[in-house]
């Protein structure tokens, strides 16, 4: 009949299209939960590689067709492509993804409980030495860029802020009267209040004098007045390290340095957990292991018992036991 629109035949999505839709559905839930940008990026990178792997190795596999065997093959490929740690992180991403699909009723069986955990050796935390931090601060230079770098370094070393947290700070988050910092964009959407010391306060005052009045609320800005992002911060710190002759200077290493310096200065791991914004003590214990190595060396140099070495090592010869 004239004027009638022909019926449109709906076709089922291909397995690959279904996988892509499942991934986007997962990220919609991540956004609804308010996950940190870094966490979402972390998930997206690894799920993108899963989609590519399935397209090559199992093009007919939709979300419900992914088996434990296929996941193991993917993790082995990730281990060979990156490292055991890379495969470990990939497994964590897949666990979150397939748990989401199971909750949504898109799976009859979650394959992840059958997939063995990937054993990855924990990397030793390698903080910057105090002398290296001093060199970084001394090589900041002058002007706006130098003042900004000094404020960033001083604040990161004093508080252990994550890169995203430092970049997310607004002017209103800094109280110079009480020397308190409100971290509004912490991991997982949590908010916490951090104290900062006199050195960080002095560096912030020097930077704010150079920053002047700008239309943005951002604390740390580029020389064009835009808010710094994580890539900017990584680049700034890398160049600062190159000028000071120090390799691998990045925000997370400064976070490690803040944690170990805090413990070396007498802080306890429970206060450190709150300072860093960790939900558990698992990561904080790694910093404690670093300071334990310090203890061994310091005890050798300043053993209380060795003050009485002469009294212990008295001239002997053979003596009868009594």
Image (cartoon, helix red, strand yellow):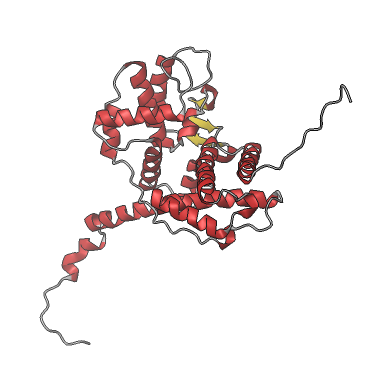
Q: Is residue 150 above or below residue 252?
A: above
- Front one among 100 and 2: 2
Look at the image and tell me whether residue 200 can be seen: no
Left/right placement of residue 173 relative to residue 305 reads right
Q: Disc count in the image? A: 0
Left/right placement of residue 172 relative to residue 294 reads right
Left/right placement of residue 299 relative to residue 234 reads left
Q: Residue at x 21, y 64 (%)?
A: 308
Q: Where is residue 4 in the image (x, y as percent from the top left)?
A: 86, 25
Q: Which residue is drawn at 53% across and 33% down?
A: 183
**Picture quadrant of residue 184:** top right
- Front one among 209 and 127: 127
**Picture quadrant of residue 22:** top right
- Front one among 196 and 238: 238
> For the C terminus, which image quadrant?
bottom left
Q: Where is residue 36 in the image (x, y as percent from the top left)?
A: 56, 37
Look at the image and tell me whether residue 316 can be seen: yes
- Front one among 206 and 248: 248
Left/right placement of residue 288 relative to residue 68 reads left
Outermost residue to the front = 1
Q: Position of residue 200 (x, y in %)?
A: 40, 29
Q: Residue at x 48, y 35 (%)?
A: 195
> For the N terminus, which image quadrant?
top right
Q: Where is residue 108 in the image (x, y as percent from the top left)?
A: 69, 57
Q: Which residue is drawn at 59% across and 39% down?
A: 35
Q: Is residue 148 above or below residue 87?
A: above
């Amino acid at each position: 009949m004239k004027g009638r629109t022909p019926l449109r035949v709906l076709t089922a999505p291909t397995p690959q299209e279904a996988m892509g839709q499942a991934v986007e559905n997962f990220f919609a839930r991540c956004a609804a939960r308010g996950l940190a940008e870094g966490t979402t990026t972390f998930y997206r990178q690894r799920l993108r590689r899963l989609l590519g792997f399935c397209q090559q190795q199992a093009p007919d596999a939709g979300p419900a067709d992914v088996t434990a065997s296929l996941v193991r093959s993917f993790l082995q490929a990730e281990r060979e492509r990156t490292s055991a740690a890379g495969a470990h992180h990939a497994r964590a991403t897949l666990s979150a993804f397939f748990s989401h699909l199971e909750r949504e009723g898109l799976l009859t069986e979650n394959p992840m409980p059958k997939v063995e955990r990937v054993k990855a050796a924990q990397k030793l935390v390698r903080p910057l030495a105090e002398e290296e931090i001093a060199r970084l601060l001394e090589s900041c230079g002058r002007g706006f860029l130098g003042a900004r770098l000094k404020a960033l370094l001083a604040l990161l070393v004093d508080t252990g802020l994550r890169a995203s947290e430092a970049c997310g700070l607004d002017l209103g988050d800094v109280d110079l009267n009480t020397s308190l910092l409100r971290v509004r964009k912490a991991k997982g959407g949590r908010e916490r209040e951090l104290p900062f010391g006199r050195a960080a306060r002095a560096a912030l005052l020097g930077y704010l004098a150079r920053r002047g009045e700008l239309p943005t609320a951002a604390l740390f800005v580029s020389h064009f007045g835009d808010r710094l992002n994580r890539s900017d911060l990584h680049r700034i710190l890398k160049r600062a390290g190159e000028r000071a002759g120090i390799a691998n200077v990045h925000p997370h290493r400064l976070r490690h340095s803040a944690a170990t310096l805090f413990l070396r200065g007498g802080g306890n791991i429970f206060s450190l957990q709150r300072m860093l914004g960790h939900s558990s003590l698992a990561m904080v214990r790694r910093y404690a292991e670093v300071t334990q190595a310090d203890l061994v060396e310091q005890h050798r140099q300043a053993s209380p018992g060795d003050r009485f070495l002469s009294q212990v090592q008295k001239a002997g010869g053979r003596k009868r036991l009594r």
